[in-house]
Image (cartoon, grey):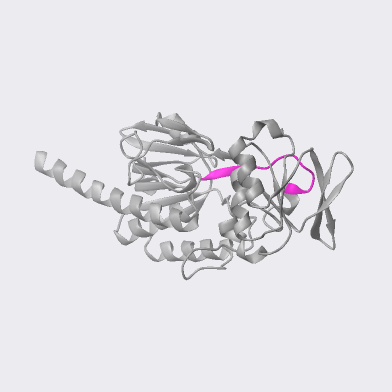
Amino acid sequence: MTQKDSYEVVVVGGGTAGLSAALVLGRARRRTLVVDAGEPRNAPAAHMHGYLSRDGMPPAEFLALGREEIARYGVELVRDRAVDVGKDGDFAVALASGRTVHARRLLIATGLKDELPAVPGVAERFGRDVLHCPYCHGWEVRDQAFGVLATSPMSVHQALMVTQWSKDVTFFLHKVSEEELSDDDLRRLATAGVKVVPGEVTGLVTQDDRLTGVGLADGTTHHREVLFVAPRAVPQTDLLRRLGAELRETPFGAYPVVDETGLTTVPGVWSAGNARGFAEQVVNAAAGGYRAGSTINGELLMSDLDATVRV
């Protein structure tokens, strides 16, 4: 093992959480490497919102600024993918390029992937007028004709939430039967003024590169300008599984069991961002990365002091 391949901390994931942690660690003078596969979850979005002082900034610009900031403090960043990890004393992280890097501590910030329903047009328009999060994009499309595409009975929650931004909301049951909805679901939808439409959605209708309608299998088309859909969340937790981290099942996938700092059940391994939980938006991911980074630095300091005392 060469000094070039040995770090105090390796951060796997170059999104908001990973860069935030790396910034803290760099400023704490820790030899840190960020492994960035270049696949941020919010890449389809033109702008990010709800981040104080950064509201409306393009996600790519935000990350580019973050990479510039960590470089000022000597943090290294490599465009690569971590494909395996093990522990024999220090942690050994194998990269797709064939390189293996070693670290005393690990932060896994590999995020999650959104799997969209196989409806023609949904993936192509995702992040434009097919949206997921009303907190991220609701203001920009307020008062337009909304559709909500059900992906499970839990999509009722999404249909109710978006009524805060438009009173013209149609809930397309798609492959969910009305019998799967509870009486409370139906009562709330009716009270909120949401129109419930049964039947499978077969595609989207566009005109001049804008969504204009939602087509059903029965041949009908419903005029809509925006479609909200809840993708299936696929947490990128393979490295955590390989390390033996305990995971907890949620309606949105399996995520690591962590304490308030992001420490997993594997000593020396932290998690932050969407690798830690489904609802970690950009501002939350930045805070979680900061907390993990500062905790890792303090833990390394105390570990070294205790080792010196024992000697």
Q: Which residues are magenta?
A: 111-122
Q: Is residue 65 visible?
A: yes
Quadrant containing the C terminus in the rendered view: top left
Q: Is residue 252 above or below residue 31?
A: above
Task: Please provide percent x and percent y for residue 223.
Answer: 81, 55
45 sits to left or right of 306 = right
Q: Nearer the viewer, residue 40 or 280?
A: 280
Q: Nearer the viewer, residue 254 or 290?
A: 254
Q: Quadrant of residue 233?
A: top right
Task: Please provide percent x and percent y for residue 107.
Answer: 39, 45
Residue at 48% from the left image edge and 50% from the top image edge: 280
Q: Nearer the viewer, residue 310 or 128?
A: 128
Quadrant containing the N terminus in the rendered view: top left
**In this figure, what is the number of numbered marks?**
0
Q: Is residue 232 visible?
A: no
Task: Please provide percent x and percent y for residue 293.
Answer: 34, 52
Residue 254 painted magenta: no
Task: Please provide percent x and percent y for residue 235.
Answer: 53, 39
Residue at 66% from the left image edge and 47% from the top image edge: 190
